[in-house]
Amino acid sequence: MAESPRTRQRIVALEARLARLRMMRSQLVERASRTERRRDTRRKIIIGGTVLAALDHGGVPALATKAQLLDWLAARLERPADRAVFDLGLTGARALVRITGSTGAP
């Protein structure tokens, strides 16, 4: 069965759209990969800096699991940006200020 010119135009338009969507998908996957690599590099830098600082102030305890490392970091990281890289959230006075708008001091 022969294709009509209208059908052929529609097929060409859909193929062009499919090619654009595939290219957009590829770009999004690449961007997500690049973002995750940056985040991973940032985590490594923060861990290294925290370990070096701890060595200057008494040492680093034996850490056998990722959970132990995250607990140890949670107790030491203060900057919100550093805590966010590990999804630690806010703690202590900063969390109180974020939730209530004040430190709770009279």
Image: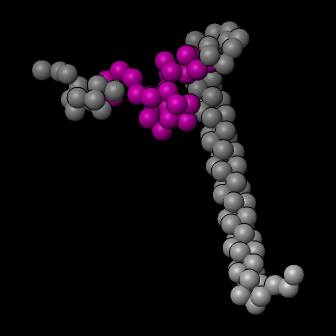
Indicate yes or no whether the magenta region holds residue 82. yes
Q: Residue 15: image x %, image y %?
A: 75, 74
Q: Main secondary structure of the magenta part?
A: helix
User: In this figure, which colouring scheme has been used for the structure?
Assistant: one colour
Whether residue 35 is situated above or below residue 53 in the rendered picture: below
- The residue that appears at 49% across and 18% down in the rendered structure is 75
**Farthest-out residue, right:** 1
Q: Nearer the viewer, residue 23 or 72?
A: 23
- The residue that appears at 50% across and 35% down in the rendered structure is 84
Span of residues in magenta: 69-94
Whether residue 104 is situated above or below residue 8 in the rendered picture: above
Q: Residue 11: image x %, image y %?
A: 75, 78
Tell how many labels: 0
- The residue that appears at 28% across and 29% down in the rendered structure is 99
Task: Locate residue 41: give its quadrant.
Answer: top right
**Farthest-out residue, bottom:** 5
Q: Residue 85: image x %, image y %?
A: 55, 36
| Residue 12 seen anywhere in this rendered image of the structure | yes
Which quadrant of the figure contains the C terminus? top left
**Farthest-out residue, front:** 1
Whether residue 37 is situated above or below residue 105 in the rendered picture: below
Task: Locate residue 36: give its quadrant.
Answer: top right
Residue 88 is left or right of residue 46, and the answer is: left
Indicate yes or no whether the magenta region holds residue 60. no
- The residue that appears at 58% across and 26% down in the rendered structure is 50
Task: Locate residue 60: give its quadrant.
Answer: top right
Which quadrant of the figure contains the N terminus? bottom right
| Residue 54 seen anywhere in this rendered image of the structure | no
Residue 72 is left or right of residue 103, and the answer is: right
